[in-house]
Image: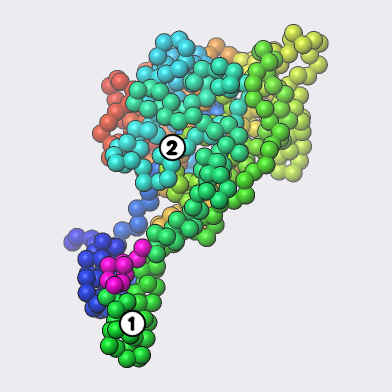
Amino acid sequence: MTKYRNVFSRRALLRGTGSIAIALPFLDEMRASSVYAAEPEPPTRLLTVFFGEGCPVKVQDQHLGALTGPFAPLAAHKAKLGFCRGLRFPDEHHYGGGSGVFTGVGQVGDDGAQTKGPSIDQVLLEEAYPDGSPSLLATLAMALVGTYHPDTGAPAVRYVKCWNNQGNPATIPRFNPQDLFTSIFGDAGELETPEAKKRRRRAQSVLDSVVGQYKHLTGEAGGLGAQSRARIADHLDRIREYEQQAFGEAPSQCQVPGKPGELPLIHGQKHHAGIIYDVNEFSAVWRTMCDLYALAVQCDLVRFGNAHFLNVGDRINFQGEYIVDGELAYTFDDYGNTPNESDLGTHVNHEHFHAWTGTGSPVHADWHLHFYMRELSYLLSKLDDPEYTDANGKTVLDNATILMSTELSDPGPHLSRDVFHAYSSGNGRFKVGEMVTAAGDPQRPAADLYNTMLEAYGVDRRMGGGDYQQVTQALK
């Protein structure tokens, strides 16, 4: 038996409203769905999330399965995340990871300005929406970084993760809350709010096709008595009410927030000594950006893009008390008792990650990674806000594909074998709540996972330029 949905589409209803007999017998059918009705399909969305420095294999071995240690902050999302081991990037160095993540290919030349192919978000954008994204912004990227900012002449692979077909940046990230706000909402008062936009769309009702006839009949020239005119007006109100029920409204929270004020972070580089940041100030700025970014996605202003926490090979001296669950967990002091300024470069987060070896796990790096995971977890929580749901009643985290990764698997020797990858279910397309391994010899190209995801969306195009082997373990 063929399953069907016994409700009218907006287009079908428009075709039936060409006369003043505007489908009264059908209104109740608009309201009810058959038991065979399919869930409303949410929009196709894919967002990538990057964190810098890398994630050692031995730390994954010890902690990723149970989400303990540095991965503990992700435990809150365990039921909605899947993890894939056994994936590698083509090139093994910071730039190789910076260009290979989300593309599965390396960079062009040595200057880090281009990649050899597009990122997965841009491929799905083109394939799912060949006429362009229906959202206000085609792609939105944000990045909170320290050193290697564009202002310092840093190469694009340090901070760009959205690449077009030519291997050029599809967009440049917004590096602070003020610029991100302006990119989403424009200057104060210039951009129609998401809520107003939805109201305007709904105001363009199915009634518009016959409104001229109704204006005539409800006016003095129509020749109808007051009671008849009132009955027609009530009829219009009833149709409008059913239309709202059938097609829904935007969440009431979808309105332009206040523009964030200036926050105390700067970008740049001071040789290899990095920049001093208070860990709590850094977190506050990131979370302000996450709030804005999540709102843009939830209100369907954007469906594709990247959130970028720390640059590829970033160099930061974190300072300050790190509070976890209301208690002091660690005190960041990356400079420590450095004897003189010439040695400062050996005490940045970059060098702490390089100190990770097969036999030792420096406590500094453990807590840095814990901090990174905590901040990424905050973004996931915002995307999982039950106050903002799609037509199927699920959150963005449930419906979208959120793909998370980093640049290296072992920062010490700059290896990119068995690089950390996590993902959300993509509305049931991918297996979550567990860890899978893309078995291969010696490791599987990361492009295999990316192509598996594209295939799950019905996309025939393939990334990476090589033979494709489906990562079946990641599929639902």
Q: Residue 382 at x, y = what percent? A: 56, 47
Question: Hey, which quadrant is residue 319 in on the image?
Answer: top right
Foreground residue among 210 and 309: 210
Q: Is residue 126 left or right of residue 273?
A: left
Indicate whether residue 96 is drawn in magenta.
Answer: no
Q: Main secondary structure of the magenta part?
A: helix
Q: Foreground residue, 341 or 82?
A: 341
The range drawn in magenta is 204-212
Q: Which image quadrant is residue 400 in?
A: top left
Mark 1 or 2: in front is: 1
Residue 179 position within the rendered picture, expressed as x and y whole percent measured from the top left: 57, 36
Residue 253 visible here: yes
Q: Secondary structure at mark 1?
A: loop
Q: CA distance from mark 1 to mark 2?
A: 48 Å
Q: Residue at x 35, y 66 (%)?
A: 205
Residue carrying label 1? 219
Q: Specify how the rendered protein is coloured.
A: rainbow
